[in-house]
Image: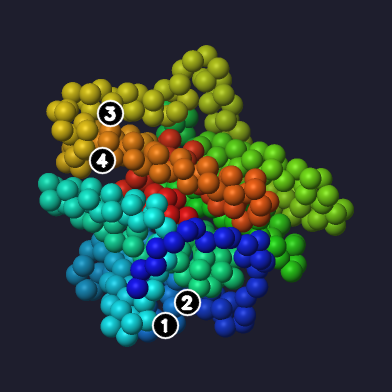
Amino acid sequence: MIILGKQETLSDEMMNFTADRKTMIFWGLSCLFFIAYGMNQIMDLLLFLIFIVVVFFIKEEYFIYISAGLLIFSDAVLLPEILNFSGVSLSRIFLIAFFLRLAVKMLKREFSVKITWGRLSLLLIIFAYTTISFARSRNMDTLIGFLYMIVLIYIYDFIFRKKPEMLSRFIVAFSLFCISSCIYSFLHMNEMQQVVSSYGGMEFERFSGTFEPNFMCLYYNFSIVGLLFLKFKYPIIKYGMLGLFYALMIMTMSITGVIANIAVILLYLVFTKARFLKLTPFKIAAVTVSGLLVAGIAVILFKDNVYQFYERIYIVVKQTSVGHLNTATSGREGITKYYMSVFSNLNVTDRLFGNYVNWKRMFDSFKAAHNTYVDAIYMIGLIGSFFYAVTVGIMFANSLISYVKDKREVNLMVCSQKLIVLISGLTLSFFNSRLFYLFILF
């Protein structure tokens, strides 16, 4: 049953982290599963069979935690090679399991989800564009993206309406999976990505984890924002994890990630100034010690990378100050200009309504746009982009206005997460991924 109604009222009690022993054991086993996957074919086959059993029969709360892990490990956990399904992610199996579980719930008349009129309207608009895109180009990525959006609507409803205490657990689980991705990358010897910079050919290494460094930094920022607002029984755990994620963020050398993080911290300080000034000496000491400890370890173990990151920031600032934006943005300004020049020569229909084929052609013959908003214009056209912009703007403003009205920090956290994605979208291409739908829905 679909229930139409207003947005759920968010409570700050959702930010109090509590978890029972069974839940924490499940998180630990899930982290071990993702870390161990890919070691050898026999183990992968065994883990794959365990995954099948788990996603089809495990209780709903744990099923949702698995979705958090797959957000980070989707490109790393593929079907075993012995099955001859090269490149197919376990997230596809998860998607099949979700809809089969959903069908069973419907048959038993146990299914119910609440959705606002705004989200329903947006869902219908996206469905229309997805149908058109698939009909014109047989674009499976867009179709799968739409299916994932349905999954996210259900997860949103489950967390915010049926089991609100799960919000803090979901954030902690997501953070633990991020840390697990670092362990995974070290064990699988793919932790560093060698990059030759456009700044005079300077070479440096960036921490990549299970995704490209800029995307990993985006995930670290998600964790940082969530942990920043959570309340723990033992604050030292919170500040220790925050220190670790800041060290990892520096290791990715993502300038966009740092800018997005600074923007969120400024937003946090502006709206929680009174609370920030009332920090107890113990909390200030905990933050300081945790930060210095993690930073010290990072400098000792990766001193060359820390120095390279400093060099990179210096060069970006210098190039920006003299107006060389294309150099400062690693060529992104030039890429955007080229994409837009080609777009201006498309026919009127494609410019107004978009065409996935045009974007795919540009991606294959040139390179990625490195800009979510450019991708959106290509894929759904000017009209579709206008609807997206209005919807996203309204939802972002609503989160901020809700906080100003009732001072509930959970609203400020949601707003901060959206700000992270908005800024990251300027240099990353994720319009056609779950990240974009996650941003719209939450």
Can residue 64 be spotted in the picture? yes
Q: Which residue is mark 2?
A: 62
Give the quarter of the figure containing the N terminus.
bottom left
**Residue at 42% across / 29% down in the picture?**
330
Question: x%, y% of residue 398?
Answer: 53, 46
> Label 4 vs label 3: CA separation?
15 Å
Circle count? 4
**Residue at 62% across / 80% down in the picture?**
20
* Mark closest to the chain's N terminus, 1 or 4: 1
> Label 3 vs label 2: CA separation?
43 Å
Q: Secondary structure at mark 3?
A: helix
When asked about the image quadrant of residue 401, the answer is: top right
The label number, if any, that marks residue 380 in the structure image: 4
The label number, if any, that marks residue 58 in the structure image: 1
* Mark closest to the chain's N terminus, 2 or 4: 2
- Residues at circles 3 and 2 in contact by the CB criterion of under 8 Å: no
Amino acid type, mark 4: Ile
> Label 1 vs label 2: CA separation?
7 Å
> Label 1 vs label 3: CA separation?
46 Å
* Mark closest to the chain's N terminus, 3 or 2: 2
Between 324 and 388, the one nearer to me in the picture? 388
Question: x%, y% of residue 439?
Answer: 44, 50
Question: x%, y% of residue 111?
Answer: 36, 77
